[in-house]
């Protein structure tokens, strides 16, 4: 009763799937864009049909058809965009400018969450090339949102566990190493690691919360502020096996960057900021998710890693 | 108790996912190959981890490491391969020859189901170029299996509903047309259309059934033998809206084939054999799934299409 209606753009993606599920789980009338461009991608289509089976409403629209976006936006109170911003998958951050235009024209949206869900681009003005493209583009979208006076919340969700925890933060794999682990520096810089579904839960919690209107919501629960060394220790405890440690200095880490492909260069830059500079934790935050929503029993990383044993 | 152990190779794929689920649902100790090659494909990894959560055992192996395949095969009684044979996704049919070698060397396998699950390649010796590659390659795998005296069942599963029913058999889309539907010829040739999970259910039913040892299992339940016209009528009844019919002669259908890309040429050939020649239904079958396993309440296409309304 009276639950706000949510439209998800990018619902078949990695974080989008979880946002759709969280929206349904929290009882919101949930609308998901079905892009005409999906063509013969049957996995995406069946993901969408599965949402429909669970109660979501599919809305056909296209980024090449402004009016279709306006019409979709008019059906709801809240828009959440989860289009991919990861270079080695696909990278569509600036496509959101079209969505901002549509939201502006529709004029009815009470909250917009653009595709963020990572580091805080507002604090990355000195980020390295070429990885800074991610932050620059997210800032361009933020600027468009704010200039259009669209009510927003930016969700800074930090490290997805699937990409950063299952592999003990090794860059070339998604599963834990069996013999040797590379430590960034001394391995003691603190990061923030989140089960992706918890990120989605917090994102949906925030959409009708006046405390986060036109603010950044930081997802940084105390139990998940961990160093890489602590992650490795959790893993070693779970498996009963010690890994050999290799310590990689910042200089060694950055040395090969020019020889890598673009997507890897972007990745190396981001890892550098997280694991050498500590950019996720070297500042205080005000609107922190686990403080605002203490009822959420977020998953700890010892629990998360059990599935990898 | 005493349920045979099943290894699935290709478990993250379109039909493979359903086979894993069906194997678990029918109580088999279920092993799934986790290929080292998945690299940074997080969707595949998380699909595998989801299987693990549901009780499957993940087995690391690689097609570049013969011994790893032999070791994996030795753990089980039955091997099911579901590697993709659809050109516009990926096409790995002949990679199975390596698996045949491993099964031969291991020597313990009581049943092998190679990646078939489509038309019967044993009846397609006169198929068109270039689409015949699919059948020729499947026959090459069959030959290797039989020469190695590996006990087998070939599952001829006919048309996956996701590719042939949701779109009323239109080739350029996965969702139903809204105005016009193209009929192949008069639209009266009979095909066979199956919910993919039912295919998986039958495939698992057959693995320890002596009646299908060294035979082809045809999945052709009477309720799902339908013409394209009948599919369209089901859809029109569900939606209450008549579609405009366009009748495409065989000549018109084949005319543009040379101008298409390879994957589309393959697709056109297959559609031609199904919808003009009637190759799925113009012969009698002996081992038919719904007769052998009448306890399976297979999904009818009126039910299937409801999700698309």
Image: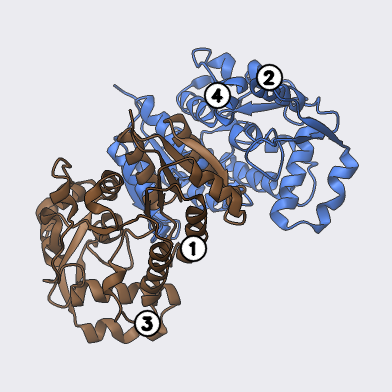
Chain colours: A brown, B blue
- Frontmost of labels 3 and 4 is 3
Q: Secondary structure at mark 4?
A: helix
Where is mark 4, residue-wise? Answer: B212
Point out the image quarter for the C terminus of chain B.
Answer: top right
The span from disc 4 to disc 2 (Cα, nearest Å) is: 38 Å
- Frontmost of labels 1 and 2 is 1
**Residue B90 location in percent, x, y?**
57, 53
Label 1 Cα neighbours within 10 Å, binned few <14 / some 14-19 / many ≥20: some
Along the line of sight, the residue nearer the viewer: B119 or B242 = B242
Label 3 Cα neighbours within 10 Å, binned few <14 / some 14-19 / many ≥20: few
Label 2 Cα neighbours within 10 Å, binned few <14 / some 14-19 / many ≥20: few
What's the mark number on residue A263? none
Circles 3 and 2: CB atoms closer than 8 Å:
no
The span from disc 3 to disc 1 (Cα, nearest Å) is: 23 Å
Where is mark 2, residue-wise? Answer: B237
Along the line of sight, the residue nearer the viewer: B114 or A84 = A84
Q: Is residue A102 left or right of residue A194?
A: right
- Frontmost of labels 4 and 2 is 2
**Residue B223 location in percent, x, y?**
64, 16
Which chain hosts label 3? A
Where is mark 1, residue-wise? Answer: A97
Mark before the other along the chain sequence, 4 or 2 = 4
Residue at (26%, 59%) from the top-left corner? A215
């Amino acid at each position: 009763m009276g639950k706000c209606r949510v439209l998800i753009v990018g619902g078949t993606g990695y974080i989008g799937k979880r946002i759709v599920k969280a929206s349904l789980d929290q009882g919101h009338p949930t609308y998901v864009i079905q892009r005409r461009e999906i063509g013969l991608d049957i996995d995406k289509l069946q993901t969408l049909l599965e949402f429909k089976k669970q109660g979501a409403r599919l809305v056909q629209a296209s980024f090449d058809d402004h009016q279709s976006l306006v019409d979709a936006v008019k059906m709801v109170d809240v828009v959440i965009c989860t289009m991919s911003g990861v270079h080695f998958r696909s990278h569509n951050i600036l496509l959101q400018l079209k969505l901002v235009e549509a939201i502006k024209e529709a004029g009815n949206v009470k909250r917009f969450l653009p595709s963020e869900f990572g580091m805080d681009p507002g604090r990355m003005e000195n980020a390295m090339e070429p990885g800074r493209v991610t932050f620059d583009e997210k800032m361009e979208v933020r600027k468009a949102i704010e200039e259009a006076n669209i009510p927003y919340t930016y969700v800074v969700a930090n490290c997805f566990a699937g990409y950063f925890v299952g592999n003990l933060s090794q860059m070339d794999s998604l599963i834990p190493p069996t013999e040797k682990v590379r430590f960034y520096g001394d391995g003691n810089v603190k990061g923030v690691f989140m089960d992706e579904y918890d990120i989605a839960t917090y994102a949906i919690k925030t959409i009708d919360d006046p405390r986060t209107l036109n603010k950044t919501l930081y997802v940084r629960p105390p139990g998940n502020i961990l160093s890489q060394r602590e992650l490795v220790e959790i893993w070693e405890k779970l498996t009963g096996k010690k890994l050999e440690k290799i310590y990689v200095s910042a200089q060694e880490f950055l040395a090969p960057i020019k020889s890598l492909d673009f997507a890897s260069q972007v990745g190396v830059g981001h890892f550098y900021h997280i694991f050498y500079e500590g950019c996720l934790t070297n500042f205080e935050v005000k609107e922190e998710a686990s403080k605002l929503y203490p009822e959420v029993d977020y998953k700890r990383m010892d629990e998360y890693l059990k599935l990898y044993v």
